[in-house]
Image (spheres, grey):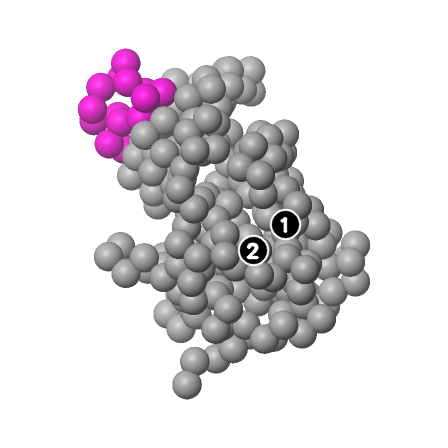
Amino acid sequence: MTLRIPVAAIVFDFDGVLAESVEVKGEAFCALYDSHGPDIQRKVLAYHRAHGGISRFDKIRHFEEEFVGRPVTSKDVNHLAQRFSALVEDRVIAAPWVAGARDFLEQFYQILPLFVASATPQEEIERIVKARRMAFYFKGVFGSPEKKSAHLQTIARTYGFPASRILMVGDTVSDYNAAAESGTAFLGRHISDIPCPFPEGTPTIADLRELESRIVPNP
């Protein structure tokens, strides 16, 4: 029997949970390092895939210092992040929905408070959600530089939800860790043909067509 999770609110990661945009960002990171050759690009893409849910600023600093081998200032990182944003934003807006995501939001946005917590910069994720005509589904949309764990704690405190009745739906171990740090429930999206990033026993779904069957709305 599949365990159903009692929830008073749901917080979604964005890339890979609501939109199929993880590979869009991987391709953009590779384009950012086109002049450094295929070996660096392979390392960049592998790191991106293994460290989903981490901000682009932290990834870029790692790429520069560990793969390219040069120290960078915050100004350098911000410049590269702006180039990355220019490469990726329109493509994320145009990315297909994760299967079942739009139907779930449409069915539940008037039943449960729904939120987005993303590692994408705040203004950018707000523009993306608005451009995709999704904003009305959510009580709040949260981005970086604040960490997802801080967003979960803010939601619990602001709306008065017990942390244990908030469900974080994510596709990366950083999402799992944010939920663990905040005391919230967690449900992972795991596509079966890739290694599962979550600890053994973590409840997972293949896409959001399964989400309704895994929750019990419990305001």
- Look at the picture and state if 158 lies above or below 82: below
Amino acid type for the residue under numbered disc 2 = Leu
Q: Is residue 61 visible?
A: no
- Do the residues under discs 2 and 1 have CB atoms within 8 angstroms? yes
Q: Position of residue 22 (x, y in %)?
A: 38, 41
Q: CA distance from mark 2 to mark 1?
A: 6 Å
Give how far across and how far down residue 156 sits, in percent.
73, 59
Residue at 51% in and 19% down? 82
Quarter of the figure with residue 188: bottom left
Membership of 40 in magenta stretch: yes
Q: Nearer the viewer, residue 51 or 101?
A: 101
Disc sitting over residue 58 in the figure:
none
Picture residue at 63% right of the left edge, 29% below the top? 123
User: For numbered disc 1, what is the local secondary structure?
Assistant: helix
| Residue under the image location 28 percent in, 14 percent down | 35
Instruction: Say which residue label 2 marks.
Output: 105
Q: Residue at x 46, y 26 (%)?
A: 90
- Seen from this angle, which residue lies furthest bottom? 1
User: What is the x, y in percent for residue 151?
Assistant: 66, 49
Tell me the element at label 2.
helix
Query: Which part of the image, by quadrant, shows the C terminus?
Result: bottom right
Q: Which residues are magenta?
A: 30-43
Residue 173 vertical placement versus 121 (above, below): below
Residue 69 position within the rendered picture, expressed as x and y whole percent measured from the top left: 34, 21
The part of the image, by quadrant, that contains residue 37 is top left
N-term mark: 2 or 1: 2
Q: Main secondary structure of the magenta part?
A: helix
Q: Residues within 10 Å of mark 1 (few under 14, many from 20)?
A: many
Q: Is residue 144 above or below residue 67?
A: below
Would you name the residue on which mark 1 appears? 137
- Asked if residue 175 lies left or right of residue 11, the reply is left
